[in-house]
Amino acid sequence: MAIDDPVQGADSPRAATEKPNDKKADDKKADDKKADDKKTSAKKANGGGKPAAPTTTWGAVRPLVLRLHFYAGLLVAPLLLIAATSGLLYSLSYQAEKVVYRQELRSPDSDRTAMLSQQVEAARAEHPDGKVTAVWPSSEDEESTRILMTMPDSEESKSLAVFVDPHTAQIRGELDSYGSSGALPLRTWLSELHRHLHLGEPGRIYSELAASWLWVVALGGLLLWIGRRRTSKRALLRPERGATGRRRTLSRHGSLGMWAAAGFLALSATGLTWSTYAGENIGAVQDQLGGATPVVSAELKSGEGAGAGAGGHEGHGGDSGAGGDHEGMDIGFDNALTAARQAGLDGPVTVKPPADGTAYVVAQRDSQFPLRLDSVSVDPGTGLILDELRFADYPLLAKLTRIGIDAHMGLTFGVVNQLLLAALALSLILIIVWGYRMWWQRRPTQDRRAGVGKPMARGAWRKVPLSVLLPLIAAAALVGWFVPLLGITLVAFLVLDVVLGAVARARAARAGAAAGG
């Protein structure tokens, strides 16, 4: 029997062709009469024909969850659809960048290697009005060195990336760069589309709303799907064979949601961590629990750095005043990088030049598992390590936050991570489309005035036991305070539902009065 099949009758085609025995027929009539008597008694006990009240907590809560899932899916789904589509494109942008910007990202292999300071000077000569803020030395064959510079007209969090051949110190090209991941124009455009629809800060409300409701819709759908009666566990994870119409759509919607629910919950949680309003609350809780992300100390103490002790003369190492704000002795980019390598920082790194009163900061930037995210500060006058910060020493919450955000961005597991994100985004798109299709398929085909499917009847909360309803209300209030946009829109849904209910009752009353008159 399939999920929504009515209970099959006792008569089969074979039984219909056989003449029953008179005694058996009489017995059957007696049994039917007893069954009818029991049904009549049950109806009377429940108020003259009303269906029996749910006998389990889930039976009482299910209509409420179903109504919330319906309204949330119907009204928030457009935002989720935009977020899923833009997220799908973003997940594919990493590999697209390697093709579109191959000229800048790659350099011909050679046995020669130019000093890092020479590469920096080449970028400075190309843009004398720019200020070097970070250097990504080439870490593999045929990879260009990336020099990040702020220009007089640079926007916040954006810089100019000058790509330099690490063998000849020749300029390979230049592109705008965004954020700590070094997103180039293609990925930056898609990132801003996904984050705020190119509307700036006001547009971030859309993405926070989507992240705030995604976990609610996913968790509600998961509970509804698992709690559904079925004859086979197979139907829980795979679409039902032979199903047609709305039943087939529901089977696809539910089984795919079952597979993708964990991923949706993870995307929602990690997306909220850097949202505007919920993100602020999450950060405050993280700080209270001692889970703030630590930062390596780059401050020069009195007597260190400029003019302090041995360490050569000003300009030693071929790069004086690397960042443009540092005065005094400077060991240069090459020696700072060498000191960091000796401290154990292998693989891809970022070298930030010193400013007045600060040291060089060299940090690993390998976010792909196994993560290499250690960092050190290097005295620009002596080349000594001033401070070390190992990722292994991060508080657990800081580790989880960093790994979660990197996974959300498609960095933690490289191409596999990006393909998984693409699969989740595509799954969400399909689930939303199937959800709207079910809504359309539920429409009354006889009553043309009702063009679309209707939600569960109002008043579902009245059937929930008080011992369950009160904790649900308290939990909803707490979550609504912690995730403000969720709380505000939930209240808006409730107000809208109450207004629509009042309008419907008023229309029914007028119709009854007109019929009576």
Image: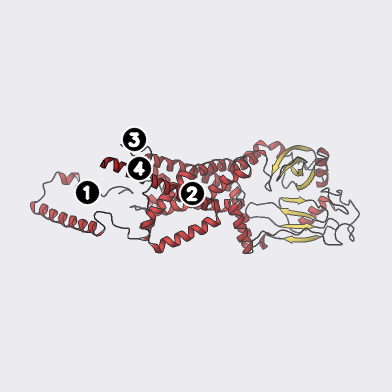
Residue 263 seen in the figure: no
Position of 332 with respect to 263 (left or right) is: right
Which of discs 1 and 4 lies nearer the camera? The answer is 4
Q: CA distance from mark 1 to mark 3?
A: 32 Å
Residue at the disc numbered 3: 448
Position of 411 with respect to 345 (left or right) is: left
Amino acid marked by disc 2:
Ala
Amino acid marked by disc 1:
Gly
Residue at the disc numbered 4: 507
User: Horizontal and vertical percent for residue 245?
Assistant: 35, 40
Amino acid marked by disc 4:
Arg
Residue at the disc numbered 1: 9
Which disc number belongs to residue 492? 2
Which of discs 1 and 3 lies nearer the camera? The answer is 3
Q: CA distance from mark 3 to mark 4?
A: 18 Å
Name which of mark 4 and mark 2 comes first in the sequence. Answer: 2
Name which of mark 3 and mark 2 comes first in the sequence. Answer: 3
Name which of mark 2 and mark 1 comes first in the sequence. Answer: 1
Q: Give the residue furthest to the front.
A: 517
Residue 56 seen in the figure: yes
The answer to which image quadrant residue 59 occupies is bottom left
Badge 1 marks a residue whose secondary structure is loop
Q: Residues within 10 Å of mark 2 (few under 14, many from 20)?
A: few
Q: Residue at x 32, y 37 (%)?
A: 447
Q: CA distance from mark 2 to mark 1?
A: 46 Å
| Mark 4 vs 2: CB contact within 8 A | no
Position of 114 with respect to 390 (left or right) is: right
Q: CA distance from mark 4 to mark 2?
A: 23 Å
